[in-house]
Every structure is written in C-alpha cells, then in structure tokens.
Image (spheres, grey):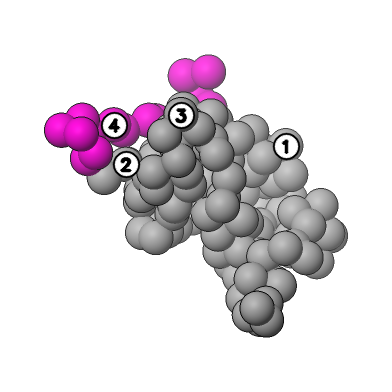
Amino acid sequence: MEIKYGEKEILDFDINNPENFWPNEHNKNYTIDIELPEFMAKCPRSGYPDFATIKIQYIPNKKVIELKALKIYINSFMNRYISHENSANEIFDTLSSKLEPRWLKVIADFKPRGNVHTVIEIDSSKV
C-alpha cells in the first residue's frame, strides 16, 4: 500500500528542526491562543482511539512556533500508544523546552469514552 503524502509528512517530521520556530519580533507581553480540535492517540492499554481538543496558550519570549509545524507535531501522536496524562505532559514539556515562553498553558480536553470525561490542564505558573 502506498504511503500518503500526509502520512509521509508526519513520519518525516522533526520537532527539533529550527524552521519550526520563528523569532518573536515583539518585546511586549501578548498571548497566543491556539486550539487543535482533532487530536488523536491510542490508549496504551486497549488500543482504542482517544480524541481530544488541545488548547495552547502562551506568552512568547524569543520564539514562536510555526503553526503548520505545530499541527504536524500534534498529528504525530495519531498512531502512538500514550495515555491522556502522558500526551498532555509531553506536549507541554516539548513546547516549554523549545519555546522557553514567559508563560504556557496546555489543556487537553478528551472526548468521553466509557462514560469518563477527562480534562488535563498544565499551567507553567502553577508547576
């Protein structure tokens, strides 16, 4: 079966590529709000898909993330077996280390499965 161009883009993606980040040209504090409503990963126990909306808010420091790079990074979780907590924390830790923002908040709002609705919030001002 032929690999599709989107699948290839995800497989080839490297979050460490410097082109994924742009210089922040502003010194003032401002908030960037991003919502990614199509997050998917696989439950590490059952293999069933878990779907979530990922909300990212940050006050940039010296860098901002390129939005297509962020989309592909989030899509890279699609075939991974990873828990709700670990996926949210990995997204937070990756963005925190790569962007070094003045402030960062990640909310992972998972769709209910088995009558359980999970929301994970990580806020750098509370960590």
Tell me how far mark 4 sits from mark 2, CA to CA: 5 Å
**Secondary element at image label 4:** loop
Mark 4 vs mark 3: give the one in front.
Answer: 3
> Quick one: 14 or 82, which is closer to the camera?
82
Residue shown at 53% from the left, 54% from the top: 78
Q: Left or right: where does residue 38 sit relative to residue 71?
A: left
The reply to whether dot 4 and dot 2 touch (C-beta < 8 Å) is yes
Q: Amino acid at mark 1?
A: Ser
Tell me how far mark 2 sits from mark 3, CA to CA: 16 Å
Q: Left or right: where does residue 77 sit relative to residue 51?
A: right
Q: Position of residue 61 (x, y in %)?
A: 67, 46
Q: Amino acid at mark 4?
A: Thr
Q: Position of residue 35 (x, y in %)?
A: 40, 57
Q: Quick check: 109 above or below 20?
A: above
**Label 4, on which residue?**
118
Mark 2 vs mark 3: give the one in front.
Answer: 3
How busy is the neighbourhood of tag 1: few (under 14 within 10 Å), some, or many (20 plus)? few
Residue shown at 48% from the left, 47% from the top: 41
**Label 2, on which residue?**
110
The residue range painted magenta reads 112-127
Name which quarter of the figure residue 17 lies in: bottom right
How busy is the neighbourhood of tag 2: few (under 14 within 10 Å), some, or many (20 plus)? many
In the displayed image of the protein, which residue is found farthest to the left?
A: 115
Q: Quick check: 50 above or below 5?
A: above
Residue shown at 22% from the left, 40% from the top: 112
Q: Is residue 121 magenta?
A: yes
Q: Earlier in the sequence, mark 1 or mark 2?
A: 1
**Secondary element at image label 3:** loop
